[in-house]
Amino acid sequence: MSDSKILLSEKEMPTKWYNIQADMPNLPKPALHPETKQPAGPEDLSPIFPMGLIMQEVSRERWIEIPEEVQEIYRLWRPSPLCRAKRLEKALDTPAKIYYKYEGVSPAGSHKLNTAVAQAYYNKVEGIKRLSTETGAGQWGIALSQACNFFGLECTVYMVKVSYQQKPYRRSVMEIFGANCIASPSNQTSSGRQILEKDPESLGSLGMAISEAVEDAAGRSDTNYALGSVLNHVTLHQSIIGLEAREQLAKADAYPDVVIACCGGGSNFAGVAFPFAYDKIVKGAKVRLVAVEPSACPTLTRGHFGYDFGDVAGFTPLLWMYTLGKDFMPPGIHSGGLRYHGDSPLVSQIVHDGIAEARAYGQTATFKSAVLFAKSEGVVPAPESSHAIHCAVEEAIAAREADEARTILFNLSGHGLLDLPSYDDYLSGKLVDYPLPEDNLKKALEQLPKV
């Protein structure tokens, strides 16, 4: 079989999600109630989440059935293709084989629809009429607006203001699908008004937008909150990416030496890496798992491992994770989806335990690799995905220098066709790096909650 593009049939699409909690040697410490600081139970989460998702959040079952209604919508684009980047290999003059799983073929243009569809479904069956959420670069906002449209739900999206300004066409797509998109921080919520009172020119952050979305959901009985990353049930839904990739590589008689994905909140990395983490933990596979983040927001590489709030206002439970502090204000880098102060507790734990590793890069280097990839493979990647591409390029060069055969798999989590202003800035030389000063990091970490 040719390994240039490896496809699975609809009948070969996984019908179960993989839950890494069944196999981790160490689970993260439990989420804590924001007021009592005691472990949060299902009853604490029920005001903003449906019970179906809460049960997935705490489940230790290895395999969880994908509802047929979710599978039916998945079939609009799944299984997604696995491609071999032969032209990139040639451009790098490397003996390595480079494969990428392409999630940009979804109607939303990214991997986010894998969990958006599932979350909309579980809310619909429990009688919820409306969802509120936040979005960084806009991929999640688009995905949830589409999923809500599929299931007849209303959708309100609080979009980080700097991305709202940088990426206007993502806002347009949300509105096409009927969502109400609001620049965050906004005057629509108490938390938003408090932030604007302190800093009227605030560019926003995911932590701020989460506060607004949670406040919105908590204030209405017909509304629940949906999160596009970080939480256990989100990483569960995304596992379909790695499950498909593993089957596709087997068709090419290949297995990766390294699996790479960009990492903001962790859903994209978890989606492709967790099924291979199963191989590593349970079967002893020697595969390396690499999460790649921006050096301007280096959560895994320089953050504190401990409890922190998931949002600025402190509405969410405290999560056991790598964090830069809930008050950390990242610069307005163009990879808006990677500007979150914390990370998935499950991703954080496997990085802390050495099952996975993390790297951080500046945005000029990642855009350089993005352009090389686009010229070689004909796909313009999202700025977030470009971090994974840059790491794959480094791995391929290392293989060349060592004259070593190496199989590299990375997740191309979305296309960049709605990120062209970012590419304009790169091509015109306006893009600069924002390495995080140590003093700024120390100041942000001083505000960590005392637990």
Image (cartoon, rainbow, N blue to C red):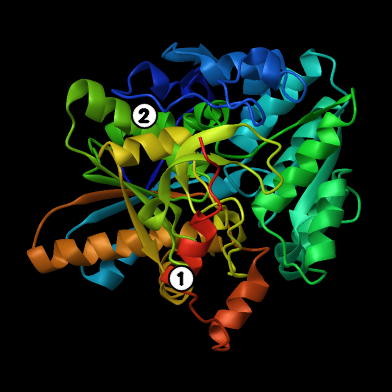
Location of residue 137 in the rendering, given as x and y in whole percent from the top left corner: 66, 57
Q: Is residue 206 left or right of residue 296?
A: right
- Between 385 and 95, the one nearer to me in the picture: 385
Amino acid type, label 1: Asp
- Residue ID for mark 1: 439
User: Does residue 67 appear in the picture of this structure?
Assistant: no
Q: Is residue 407 left or right of residue 449?
A: left
- Between 285 and 199, the one nearer to me in the picture: 199
- Mark 2, Cα crowd under 10 Å, few <14 / some 14-19 / many 20+, is many
Location of residue 270 in the rendering, given as x and y in whole percent from the top left corner: 44, 37
Amino acid type, label 2: Pro
Which comes sooner in the sequence, label 1 or label 2?
Answer: 2
**Residue located at (27% from left, 36% from top):** 353
Indicate which label's residue lies in the foreground, 1 or 2. 1
Quarter of the image for residue 166 reads bottom right
**Residue located at (90% from left, 24% from top):** 222
Q: How many marks?
A: 2
Quarter placement of the N terminus? top left
**Residue located at (50% from left, 14% from top):** 59
Cα distance between the residues tagged 1 and 2: 38 Å
Q: Which mark is residue 275?
A: 2
Location of residue 235 in the rendering, given as x and y in whole percent from the top left corner: 51, 32
Q: Is residue 382 left or right of residue 129?
A: left
Q: Relative to 124, is 355 above or below?
A: below
